[in-house]
Image (cartoon, helix red, strand yellow):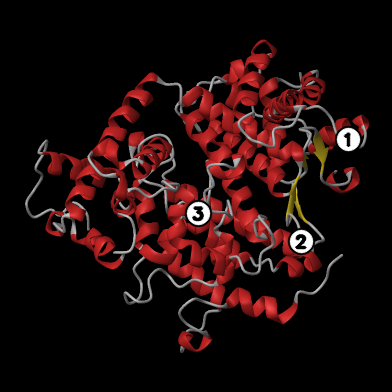
Amino acid sequence: MVDRDPQDSEILEVIDAAGRNGVDPQQLIDVLHRSYDMASVIEALQRAIERGKISLNSEGMVVALHELANAA
Amino acid sequence: MTTGRGPSLDAARRSRCFSDEAASGLDQRRPFERDRDRILYSSAFHRLAGITQIVRAGELDIFHTRQQHTYKVAQIGRRLAEHRVREQEAEAALHGLHPEVVEAACLAHDLGHPPFGHASESELDRIVRRPTLVGGTDEDAAADGYEGNAQTFRILTKLAVRYSKDHPGLDLTRATLAATLKYPWLRDLAHDKKKSKWSAYTSEEREFLWAREHCFGDFKSAEAELMDWADDIAYSVHDLEDFHRVGIIPWNEIVSPDARDRIVQGAVHTWKKDPNYPADGPRRMLTALERITRKVTLFPTVTREVYDGNREQRRQLRNFTSLLIGNYVRAISLTEEADGPAVIIEADAADEVRVLKHFARHYVIGLPALHAQQYGQKKIIRDLFEIFLKEGKSGNLKLFPARLRYIWEDNKDDKPARLAADCVASLTENEAYQLHGRLTGAESGLVLDPIVR
């Protein structure tokens, strides 16, 4: 486990890999949890929401609100 | 696309029953701004702080009062309208959509709710139609009963005190009055759609027809549509938030696949009462529940912890509800024709709101203590109505709090049951409890305290 929160760029990479329709929130959490503890994952996701980097679409899928390059 | 309903529509929308533009004098505000402010400053609006939706005002100081709910409806309604005007300028012009009107209608939308919420609303409906149940006569009855939305319209056009007796109500513009009409028809007991919800009594039919002159068929104005959707959003999300904070919503059950069938069946059961219930209702409720479950996944303190108000819980709860509201605000569009529905709401969003409302109904309204409370509250409503009816008909107005006497003095053409209901519906919940105690002799209170001011 890495002793820090996941970065926005890592979150956006997972979303980007999932394609246009975004990624299921549980799947996103599971992928990030492979490298980070759960508290860090949830903290990083809250921050990404609050900074307008990610959101939920009407289907409840997590989508990126900025291009990966801009966010990095 | 139909275009340009032009200056005549604008002039019609700005017109008032009793005064013209010249009456604004030095007032710097525009007509719809004045409407919004008149509602905000009315006694009926002030009263909203003393009544609630389901749980009694002030209980645990945690539940939204009607006034707090109304402020949030107004905020959401205004943002809905502003967003539509920015995104669909031509359609907004076609429908005459104005954010100030939507906000005004939102501020007014709950003015007619009696104390103690929907339980007393149905009780009033019963005894206004059949006053013989509480010692009245058949001649006292008002055949179209009681309904919170129709009472709102009556307050705005008749009961609100702002000007002289010959200019009753708030003298709002036609557009604002039309925007408050969520169910734009009078009651019709023979018509499924019109028998349980309606927005005006026959006593205000003239004002109703005037307000609706620029509207089409039975369709709500665009502004009324936005007010209605804002109310749905606020009600579903904020009630859920209130009941989550007191630990009544069992999230672990809701997100569990085992409970899904039961939740879906419950939501479908309620929806089936709607004449427009679709054949694929169960499937739609199931997929709506799945989407809500997905959406809450990012906020584990909501679903996995008992709420105690710690910082992280509050943060995640706010992030969750903010995302929900954002989704629903963006889920509407204006139509391109003036002769049909003015607004389209995405079915998925409407379905989710139905499911969220079901949570509150299912987990809260089933509480035994609430039933016992409502049993007593209905008795208070009946007792007060009976006293107001009997003493009002006898002209014994000295018994009435001074604030209520004008209802009988100024509206002599209306049915006595209607006036007795007006008196009951003008009270806050505390006023109802205290006045009931005094008038039934259970608790005299202080002689220098009029209770109702």
Query: Quick check: can you spot residue B119?
Result: yes
Find residue B26 and report its horizontal and vertical position in percent. 46, 89
Of residue B198 and residue A61, the one placed in the foreground of this image is B198
Q: Amino acid at mark 1?
A: Asn
Report the residue marked by disc 2. B339
Q: Nearer the viewer, mark 1 or mark 2?
A: 2
Query: Quick check: can you spot residue B41?
Result: no
Residue occupying the far top of the picture: B258
Find residue B56 and report its horizontal and vertical position in percent. 35, 37
The quarter of the displayed image where residue A60 is located: top right
Report the residue marked by disc 3. B109
Of residue B128 and residue B46, the one placed in the foreground of this image is B128
Element under disc 3: loop
Please tell me the numbered disc located at residue A21.
1
Q: Nearer the viewer, mark 1 or mark 3?
A: 3
Within 10 angstroms of label 1, few (less than 14), some, or many (20 or more) residues? some
Q: Chain of mark 1?
A: A
| Picture quarter with the C terminus of chain B | bottom left
User: How far separated are the C-alphas under marks 3 and 2?
Assistant: 24 Å
Q: Amino acid at mark 2?
A: Asp
Tell me if residue B337 comes above or below residue B324 in the rendering. below
Within 10 angstroms of label 3, few (less than 14), some, or many (20 or more) residues? many
Please tell me the numbered disc located at residue B441.
none
Q: Residue at x 68, y 66 (%)?
A: B97
Find residue B256 and report its horizontal and vertical position in percent. 66, 14
